[in-house]
Image (cartoon, rainbow, N blue to C red):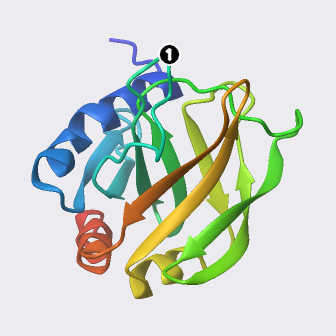
């Protein structure tokens, strides 16, 4: 039997379904997002509850979750959307976004894959440690034709979910 690698869009959709429990309970959750049947490699995740932007987006019921992934010893952070979004990034794959950690306004490097607009990676050595030590993060994103929207992700419970995520791969 041949196995094909799962396309990123399917992985994101699977993650969206798995993370719905976090929306129901309003808590951070952790689990296994996907595994490679050929190598046995697994990717674990810790996810915030799904949140809506500060202003309704007219063409959809968009939601976003802040997700931390772990594969082997590598960890990264993404903002995952419930559907593809047209994000204003000046046609580059890397740009700065404004973030507000509790009361501290900063910029965070964002990176988007050229083949999806359903997720944005937040890049930087301190993003995960900031998630663990703050109560909330507000992210400012500009959408093509819609302007700026703000997503506020609760961070309470993130430390426990991150620790659970890390133990799932042991």
Does 12 sit above or below residue 134? above
Q: Give the x, y percent position of residue 76.
A: 55, 61
Q: Nearer the viewer, residue 17 or 168?
A: 17
Residue 7 in sight? no
Lateral position of residue 21 relative to residue 99, left or right:
left
Q: Residue at image x 23%, y 71%?
A: 164
Q: Residue at image x 38%, y 43%?
A: 52
Q: Nearer the viewer, residue 6 or 112?
A: 112
- Residue located farthest toward the left when viewing the structure as drawn: 25
- Total labels: the figure holds 1
Lateral position of residue 31 relative to residue 162, left or right:
left
Residue 116 in sight? yes
The quarter in which the N terminus is drawn is top left
Residue underneath mark 1: 59
Lateral position of residue 92 relative to residue 47, left or right:
right
Q: Nearer the viewer, residue 138 or 13?
A: 138
Q: Residues within 10 Å of mark 1 (few under 14, many from 20)?
A: few
Q: Residue at image x 51%, y 49%?
A: 79
Q: Residue at image x 35%, y 72%?
A: 155
Does 99 sit above or below residue 54? below
Q: Give the x, y percent position of residue 109.
A: 75, 62
Q: Give the x, y percent position of residue 143.
A: 68, 33
Q: Nearer the viewer, residue 59 or 94?
A: 59
Q: Secondary structure at mark 1?
A: loop
The quarter in which the C terminus is drawn is bottom left
- Residue located farthest toward the top when viewing the structure as drawn: 1
């Amino acid at each position: 039997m041949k196995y094909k690698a799962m396309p990123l869009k399917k992985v994101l959709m699977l993650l969206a379904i798995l993370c719905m429990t976090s929306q129901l309970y309003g808590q951070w959750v952790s689990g296994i997002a996907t595994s490679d049947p050929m190598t046995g490699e697994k990717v674990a995740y810790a996810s915030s509850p799904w949140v809506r932007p500060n202003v309704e987006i007219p063409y959809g019921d968009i939601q976003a979750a802040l997700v931390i992934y772990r594969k082997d010893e590598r960890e990264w952070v993404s903002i995952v959307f419930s559907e593809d979004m047209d994000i204003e990034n000046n046609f580059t794959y890397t740009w700065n976004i404004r973030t507000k950690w509790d009361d501290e306004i900063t910029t965070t490097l964002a990176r988007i894959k050229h083949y999806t607009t359903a997720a944005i990676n937040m890049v930087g050595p301190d993003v995960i440690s900031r998630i663990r030590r703050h109560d909330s993060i507000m992210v400012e994103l500009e959408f093509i034709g819609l302007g700026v929207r703000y997503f506020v992700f609760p961070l309470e419970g993130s430390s426990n979910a991150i620790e659970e995520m890390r133990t799932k791969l042991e």
